[in-house]
Image (spheres, grey):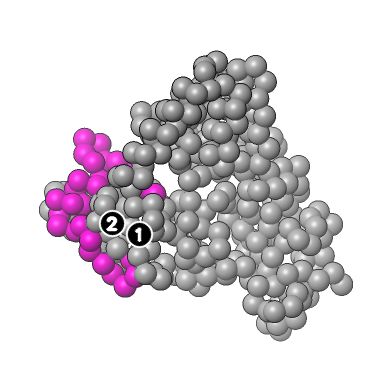
Amino acid sequence: MHKIYNAESDSPKPLGSTGEDGKEGADLAFQEQLLQILKKEQIRIKEPMSRHTTFRTGGPADYYLSPEIGQAGEVLSLCRREGVPVEIIGNGSNLLVGDKGIRGAVVEIGQNAAEVSAEGTTLYAQAGASLAKAAQEAARSSLAGLEFASGIPGTVGGAVVMNAGAYGGEMKHVLQWAKVLLPEGKVQKFSVQELKMSYRHSLIQELSGVVLEASFALKQEDEDLIRAQMEVYRNQRSQKQPLEYPSAGSTFKRPEGYFAGKLIMDAGLRGCRLGGAQVSEKHCGFVINRDHATAADIRGLMELVQQKVQECFGVWLEPEVKMVGEF
């Protein structure tokens, strides 16, 4: 029997050795099947999700799997066959994971799937590459167009799925195509037009697909000018956003005709705290982990903000943060 790292123990041991009666055999069988696809270092058992979210909160995932791009389809197919629930993540920058953790498997499309390369005026990136890495590679290649994304704390895959944007730029402005793994196991290449991208939305969400790779059409530009613009955005972020505290970025989507941060401020919620969670005093659009906040603290504060803004202005704030797992 192979040994796999178990975060609840000082020494590696297989899942199932402390499992419930009747469950141990199924756990061990599933683990053995995983080892036919992944190396043992790509598999973690009872892994605290606080290590993998920018909120720095969240209980343990039963399985935390880090496949390479070519392994992702096999891993997801195995989970489907065995009835193991799956949550796909990038770098956890828009997730709030419940304090009781995630039952089933978390599949990280991250560091093991993060290659970036440039050819001519085209940038190719695997889904697990950070936006910062993609933007830096574009700058090194004297390619302009991704400067707006250089400070967004997410991966290329997640950014394509939600059409991430900042400072007037959006992924749909530079994306050419994305390769998407569909639930039935088929990999399909979608053009940016086919993805029907809009504010924080794309067709991929409706298809429950997983981005594997993306291509961006950029423009030749002087590297110094590109880096100067990235520095302008970096300074603006550091001045206006509470980057010194763990958060998931903008907590709520922008309501049509309004700004979420201003609504929250005008509702008198600047600095409002619940447990270790706080509405940022620097930017009211951010709920931050001010002091060892639990996921329950953060969710509770988000709900309080929603209710208060609804009472004051008749506007319901829709979370930009995705909540997963057991609270």
Which residue occupies 68% across, 58% down? 65
Residue ID at (60%, 31%): 137
Crowd class of label 2 (few under 14; some 14 to 19; many from 20; radius 10 Å): many
**Disc ID at residue 115:** none
Q: 10 Å neighbourhood of mark 1: few (<14), some, or many (≥20)?
A: many
Q: Would you place residue 321 above or below residue 217 in this image? A: below
**Under tag 2, what secondary structure?**
loop
Task: State the residue in front, 28 or 59.
Answer: 59
Please name the residue that numbered disc 2 is placed on: 280
Q: Give the side of residue 15 with respect to residue 8, left or right.
A: right
Q: Nearer the viewer, residue 127 or 137?
A: 137
Is 252 in the magenta? Answer: yes
Q: Which quadrant of the figure has residue 169?
A: top left
Q: Position of residue 262 (x, y in %)?
A: 20, 46
Q: Quadrant of residue 32?
A: bottom right
Image quadrant containing the C terminus: bottom left
Mark-to-mark CA distance, 2 and 1: 6 Å
Residue 119 in the magenta stretch? The answer is: no
Quadrant occupied by the N terminus: bottom right
Residue at the spot 41% in from the left edge and 71% down from the top edge: 292
Q: Is residue 16 above or below residue 126?
A: below
Q: Position of residue 105 (x, y in %)?
A: 64, 61
Decide which of tag 2 and tag 1 comes sooner along the chain.
2
Magenta stretch, residue numbers: 249-277
Q: Which residue is mark 1?
A: 288
Q: Is residue 170 visible?
A: no
Q: Secondary structure at mark 1?
A: strand
Residue type marked 2: Ser
Residue 163 point in image, percent of width and height: 46, 35
Image quadrant assignment for residue 10: bottom right
Q: Is residue 166 left or right of residue 217?
A: left
